[in-house]
Amino acid sequence: MTFALKRSVLATAVAALVAAPAYATNGMNLEAFGAKAGGMGGASFAYDNGNSALMNNPATLSLRKEGNNFGLGLTVLNPNVDARYDAYGMEASSGGDSYLMPSVSFIKKSGQFTYGAGILAQGGMGTEWGKSSFLSMDLATGTATGLEQRSEVGFARLMFPLAYQVNDDLAVAAQLDYVRATMDLKMIDPMNMVHVDASDNNDFNGRMTGDGWAFKLGAHYKVSKEFAIGATYHSETDISDLEGSATLTVMPGSPMSAMMPAGAYPAKMRIVDFQWPETYGVGVAWNVTDKFMLAADVKRIKWSKSMKNFTTTMNVMDMGWQPEQSMPQNWDDQTVFMIGGQYMIAPNVALRAGFNYADNPVPDDTMNPLFPATIKSHYTLGVGWNIGGGHSVAASLAYAPEVEQTGTGMLNNGLTTTHSQTTWRINYNYNF
């Protein structure tokens, strides 16, 4: 293969890789919600895991005592992502290494009913590649363009649960979720020598936004005093297209310069039909002794529908929306296995540990080494402390060891990504 042909293949590959957001953990779904479940590998469907049941199984909200509960939480995701192209001796490290996801909630139990509201960041991650990395090169000349590449995606939910205690053994729940999605993109098309900037560099928002609705259903059944079963269903979201302002920069020597001279042009960008997938699962909890509990869940995430394609369009200088461009993703549906244990070392102190496993949902031929979703295993530890006076805190740590994936498709052959991460969680609750 001649150098010119190799350069053309590389240019085509990189151009195709800069048109999607970044994901982490179980696909782009966090492996756990809340510090208590976070310490137990994410297992949460069949026992009282606090206000985080809003994202787990809302039926378990009925397991608490009567009264009010106010909760605050923070999740900190620390990914370590590298990309390389061994055939060309090129490598780069992402500067996106810390993402904050807060939560706040208020839940009230009165008689047979439990209800309230909560706001929670469901997911958030991105990658940031320096202006001098190989991902920012002008491949025709082999020099850096000085234009940054960046991606960040986030989903947040405002949730309204209603759980009902049917009898001493059975609880059911329904929940309405308002969902807001945000996305930032800075990307280079090295074939056409243009740069798109649809990013606001805000850690808690994105330049392109969309919103909509979803719902959850849940059930919890006590088989005996020691053993319980939980099940939940989360609908696919119905979110509007993500849209926001952008800047299109045409670089000198661009094939587009005959129509648009080199320079920066105002534009709008739209991400079409970007949805959070349908999810359902079942779990068990077993109080082996008064001090020791085991929990295990399995859930199915239906990525094959929501991540079949990644579709975008632009409107430059209000000249009209261009035809939609779709990049195949073809993610596989994902089965997630979670198991955890809790041991009370004192009446008010719990230690927790767990494990979470799911296959990588991204096929090799559509793998995007700049925006990986390749994590498979999570090892977790946690602690809970009932301080007294209605106050309690919980914390957890999840470690995901490095996973490597190399593309095999026409546009990503030989491109490799490595990805590892740690996730920290802390929750504070006040019962009154």
Image (spheres, rainbow, N blue to C red):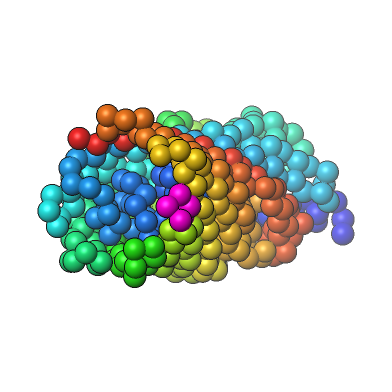
Q: Nearer the viewer, residue 55 or 78?
A: 55
Q: Nearer the viewer, residue 411 or 76?
A: 76
Eyeballing the image, is 131 above or below 240? above
**The residue positioned farthest toward the right in the image shown:** 2
Residue 163 place in picture, x, y as percent: 21, 58
Residue 277 place in picture, x, y as percent: 41, 62
Marks counted in the figure total 0
Eyeballing the image, is 19 above or below 45? above
Residue 59 place in picture, x, y as percent: 28, 59
Q: Relative to residue 49, is residue 359 drawn left or right?
A: right
- Residue drawn at x 18%, y 46% is 66
Residue 183 is at least partly visible in this image: no
- Residue drawn at x 52%, y 67% is 335
Residue 430 is at least partly visible in this image: yes
Quadrant where the N terminus lies? bottom right
Q: Relative to residue 48, is residue 185 drawn left or right?
A: right
- Residue drawn at x 26%, y 49% is 64
* Residue 273, image quadrant: bottom left
Q: Relative to residue 121, is residue 93 drawn left or right?
A: right
* Residue 190, image quadrant: top right
Question: Magenta part mainly helix, strand or loop?
Answer: loop
Looking at the rendering, the stretch of residues picked out in magenta corresponds to: 289-293
Eyeballing the image, is 194 above or below 368? above
